[in-house]
Image: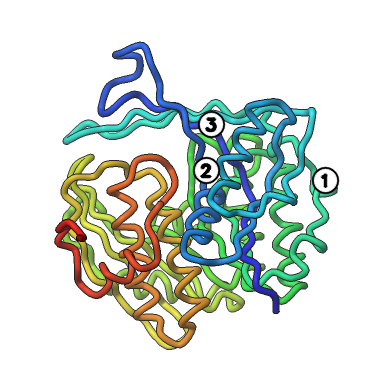
Amino acid sequence: MGKKFVTFGEIMLRLKSPGHERFFQSPSLEATFGGGEANVAVSLALLGKDAQFVTALPTHAIGEAALREVRKYGVDVSAIKRTKEGRVGIYYLETGANQRPSMVVYDREGSSIALAKPSDFDFDAILADAHWFHVTGITPAISQSAADSTLEAMKAAKKAGATVSVDLNYRKKLWNYGKSAVEVMRSLAKYADVIIANEEDIQKCLGIEAKVDVTSGELELSVYEELTAEVKRQFPNISVVNVTLRESKSADHNGWRAAINGKSGFYVSKYYEITDIIDRVGGGDSFSAGIIYALSEYPDDEQYAIDFAVAASALKHSIGGDFNLSLKSEVEALCKGDGSGRVQR
């Protein structure tokens, strides 16, 4: 088995209103890049893994800038398909505060990755020396050909002997090319070893019901143990189900923990009260990167794996932009209980 950690999906231009302003309250937008699978690749590279990101990008200057942004964090971009077709997708972000939620507006139709066909990528070659392959439910939602490419990539990863993880990541605004999320994601889940999700993702992508009210404060853990067990019952190929438990008290104040139903049992992470959120976009991706890293390093310690992933994601809430720029030493320090925020001298 190889050493590469490969992700496949879309990177977008992210245009955000300054601070906590409404769109165009002042005449500017902050331009960065982000997207689920790119975020995971960057996190894994910063945690010390040999990370590779695969996508399709146009050959013009904006496509080049997106590629350069990922490469600067040490991510291998050699398998990115450059094309004259399509565009760089865009998403607009307005950061909420208190009782006003954050808002995302997508402008990504006709992007290069949405138009790319499975034959545009030599997945057998790309994944030949992969240790781990990660995708999300976002890419299969953008077009039929993107869903086909995701399936081909997962099959190639399985053939190569890599561990395959899927963050279900349900996005209601994207599923509009004629297939339902359940139809597509259940077929993809048959090739997964590890699932990452929240209770809504499991319901909307796999059609498995959860009796949970995320706005009610305290979350009932037994519900999640049963929910994750049901996923494993319906998909015997899946050995690990991770479920994030976010309590949304306001836009800036969340309770944060997660649970893992793994090979050795059901474990719940430490709980974090996150009271001053800087940016929660990418929080789930930072969790995915954390669980991938920890399960690959400590496959026999699933309690540590879930604690590491939740700590990594808790730190991401303090960092603006899509990428989690936290280092392994910082995540480990928080795992050990150093959440004081005191100056490190």
Identify the mark at residue 13; answer none if there is no mark: 3
Q: Contact, CB < 8 Å: mark 3 with mark 1?
A: no
Name the element at disc 3: strand
Image point (60%, 56%), residue name: 135
Residue sitting nearer the eye, 199 or 192: 192
Count of labels in the image: 3
Can you identify the residue that label 1 sits on? 120
Residue 305 percent coordinates (x, y): 40, 75
Can you identify the residue that label 2 sits on? 35
Q: Contact, CB < 8 Å: mark 1 with mark 2?
A: no
CA separation, marks 3 and 1?
22 Å
Image point (56%, 46%), residue name: 72
Image point (19%, 42%), residue name: 250
Residue 85 percent coordinates (x, y): 77, 28
Question: Which of the 4 quarters of the picture holds residue 271?
Answer: bottom left
Name the element at disc 1: helix
Residue 182 percent coordinates (x, y): 57, 53
